[in-house]
Image (spheres, helix red, strand yellow):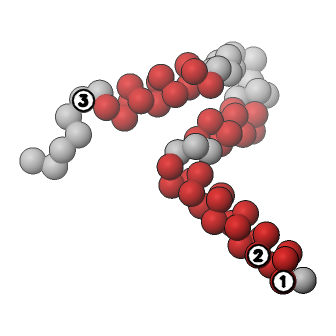
Amino acid sequence: MLKNLIEKKLCHCWHLIQQLSGDSAYAQYLQHHADFHTSSLDAPATLSRKEFYKYWQEQKWTGVKRCC
């Protein structure tokens, strides 16, 4: 019982680390694409992991990213 509780807590911590670091971004993108874009006729093609991270980094670092 204690082992199961520890495993659940570790899984929860690992999931939180993935969320904060951005490691789960591609999985979230795939889920979003499947939920919202596969049913339409003109749906965009799913990006590969490499294409997704390249696009993600370009969006993150292109343009002015400061408050002043």
Residue extending farthest to the left is: 68
Q: Quadrant of residue 5?
A: bottom right
Residue extending farthest to the right is: 1
Task: Report the side of 43 relative to 17 (left or right).
Answer: right
At x 63% / y 65%, what residue is drawn? 13
Q: Residues within 10 Å of mark 1 (few under 14, many from 20)?
A: few
Q: Secondary structure at mark 3?
A: loop
Q: Are marks 3 and 2 in contact (CB under 8 Å)?
A: no
Q: For the residues carrying marks 3 and 2, which lies nearer the camera in this image?
A: 2
Q: Quadrant of residue 58?
A: top left
Q: Residues within 10 Å of mark 2 (few under 14, many from 20)?
A: few
- For marks 1 and 3, the one nearer the N-term is 1
Q: For the residues carrying marks 1 and 3, which lies nearer the camera in this image?
A: 1
Residue 6, disc? 2
Q: Say what amino acid the circle numbered 2 marks.
A: Ile
Q: Are marks 1 and 2 in contact (CB under 8 Å)?
A: yes
Q: Secondary structure at mark 1?
A: helix
Quadrant (top left/top right/bottom left/bottom right) for the N terminus = bottom right
- Residue 7 visible: yes
Residue extending farthest to the front is: 3
> What is the total number of numbered labels drawn onto the structure image?
3
At x 76% / y 75%, what residue is drawn? 6
Residue 63, disc? 3
Q: Secondary structure at mark 2?
A: helix
Q: Is residue 67 above or below residue 7?
A: above
Residue that numbered label 1 is attached to: 2
The picture places residue 8, in percent across and down from the top left corner, at 77, 71
Per the model, the C-alpha gap separating discs 1 and 3 is 50 Å
Task: Report the side of 59 relative to 6 (left or right).
Answer: left
Q: Say what amino acid the circle numbered 1 marks.
A: Leu
- Residue 32 visible: no
